[in-house]
Image (cartoon, helix red, strand yellow):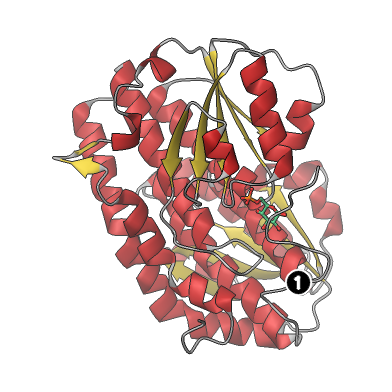
């Protein structure tokens, strides 16, 4: 079933381009987003004042990425919450709230209980799920399936990029219904989205061997930090989670702007730090701020591994390693920047002789609370 791959995870990372392509398929029509599953359900989106995204693990990081798109394109305030935290406080929700749950398996008990709770409170519910007919979509008012195909490795990879893709489609769909985004802008974002599979493939083709080599050199590393800003921030969190899950080493993700408020104290000579650099084409200011973060950690002896767009020369003098991603719209960089991090986690676990598909203490789907 692994079809020649060394692990399911390796196979599934190689399938990230088609996971995005299959999630888009049939949902773009003449430059706009048409989600057949949401036909006739416009009132799920028109009367709401707020969206709460609930999920666990990797799915929650996809939700954090989705928040940027939902707020920018659909102009709805979005909170992203861990399902188990949401459920056990007294959240302010009701008929004006749309609760969007995200789950690869559709069976995660923490997420399911939060969805049921939200319904009891009168909220509207929409599920983003990768498994046809699973329990969470059945308990929801609506479902948008990700079409990543079955994911076997415990650590989620292709489902993550498919979840972000589905959230972007949803954000454009809701923006169109609420009239918060111009048709020309929808058309441009749709074109960007359609170009993503080939760009992910380019990262795999051009950088996979380089990243695996890097992971091999770093096999004895005891801690890795990840910095990102804006949509790159949840990707930094995802990079750290993946490393914890399958390499069993300490890893933490931070918002780059937070560095000076605490985490920089962790940086000592030799500390590996991945930095996700936003394109200077979208915001020279944001780019320059992240480049100065890089200078700050490099001055303290960090081993800086930069993920930057092709042609970004400003990062070169301060980076020990540069991993390139193709040029993409600002919102679309996460779908590319996460790929090197998935490859790295897999490479490091492999270099440490670990079973990447079946990490200790973890289950693919946790059906207990
Ligand atoms: C965890 C898995 O238990 O559940 C993670 O180990 C996953 O990989 C998380 O991200 C959420 O799972 P699901 O199926 O709800 O997306």
Q: Is residue 293 visible?
A: no
- Please tell me how crowded label 1 is: few (under 14), some (14-19), or many (20+) other residues with Cα within 10 Å: some
* Quadrant including the C terminus: top right
User: Relative to 7, is 188 on the left or the right?
Assistant: left
Q: Where is residue 80 in the image (x, y as percent from the top left)?
A: 63, 32
Q: In this view, does 5 lie above or below 55?
A: below
**In the rendered image, which quarter is residue 87 located in?**
top right
Q: Is residue 24 above or below residue 30?
A: below
Q: Name the residue under label 1.
A: 359
Q: What residue sits 58% from the left and 38% below the top?
A: 136
Q: Position of residue 97 (x, y in %)?
A: 56, 16
Q: SS of the residue at dot 1?
A: loop
Q: Is residue 186 above or below residue 206?
A: above
Q: How many labels does the image show?
A: 1
Q: Where is residue 260 in the image (x, y as percent from the top left)?
A: 76, 45
Q: What residue sits 23% from the left and 43% below the top?
A: 28
Q: Which of 122 and 357 is in front in this view?
A: 122
Q: What residue sits 64% from the left and 60% below the top?
A: 239
The answer as to whether callout 1 falls within 8 Å of ligand 1 is: no
User: Relative to 223, is 145 on the left or the right?
Assistant: left
Q: Is residue 166 above or below residue 246?
A: above
Q: Nearer the viewer, residue 138 or 93?
A: 138
């Amino acid at each position: 079933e692994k079809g020649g791959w060394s692990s399911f995870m390796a196979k599934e990372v190689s399938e990230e381009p088609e996971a995005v392509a299959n999630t888009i398929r049939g949902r773009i029509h003449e430059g706009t987003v048409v989600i057949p599953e949401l036909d006739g359900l416009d009132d799920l989106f028109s009367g709401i004042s707020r969206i709460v995204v609930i999920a666990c693990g990797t799915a929650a990081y996809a939700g954090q990425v989705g928040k940027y798109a939902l707020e920018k394109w659909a102009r709805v305030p979005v909170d992203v919450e861990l399902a188990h935290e949401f459920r056990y406080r007294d959240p302010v929700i009701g008929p004006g709230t749309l609760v969007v749950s995200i789950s690869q398996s559709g069976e995660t008990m923490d997420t399911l209980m939060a969805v049921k709770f939200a319904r009891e409170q009168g909220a509207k519910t929409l599920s983003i799920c990768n498994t046809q007919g699973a329990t969470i979509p059945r308990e929801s008012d609506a479902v948008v399936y990700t079409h990543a195909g079955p994911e076997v490795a415990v650590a989620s990879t292709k489902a993550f990029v498919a979840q972000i893709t589905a959230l972007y489609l949803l954000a454009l769909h809701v923006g169109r219904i609420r009239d918060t985004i111009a048709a020309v802008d929808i058309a441009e974002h749709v074109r960007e989205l359609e170009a993503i599979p080939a760009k992910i493939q380019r990262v795999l083709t051009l950088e996979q061997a380089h990243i695996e080599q890097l992971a091999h050199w770093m096999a004895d590393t005891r801690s890795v930090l990840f910095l990102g800003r804006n949509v790159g921030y949840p990707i930094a969190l995802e990079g750290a989670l993946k490393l914890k899950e399958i390499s069993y080493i300490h890893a933490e993700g931070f918002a780059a702007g937070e560095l000076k408020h605490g985490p920089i104290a962790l940086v000592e000579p030799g500390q590996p730090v991945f930095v996700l650099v936003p394109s200077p084409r979208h915001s020279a200011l944001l780019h320059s701020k992240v480049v100065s973060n890089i200078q700050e950690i490099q001055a303290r002896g960090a081993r800086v591994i930069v993920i930057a767009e092709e042609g970004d020369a400003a990062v070169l003098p301060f980076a020990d390693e540069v991993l390139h991603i193709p040029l993409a719209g600002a919102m679309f960089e996460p779908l590319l920047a996460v790929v090197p991090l998935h490859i790295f986690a897999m490479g490091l676990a492999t270099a440490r002789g670990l079973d990447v598909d079946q990490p200790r203490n973890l289950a693919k789907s946790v059906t207990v609370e």
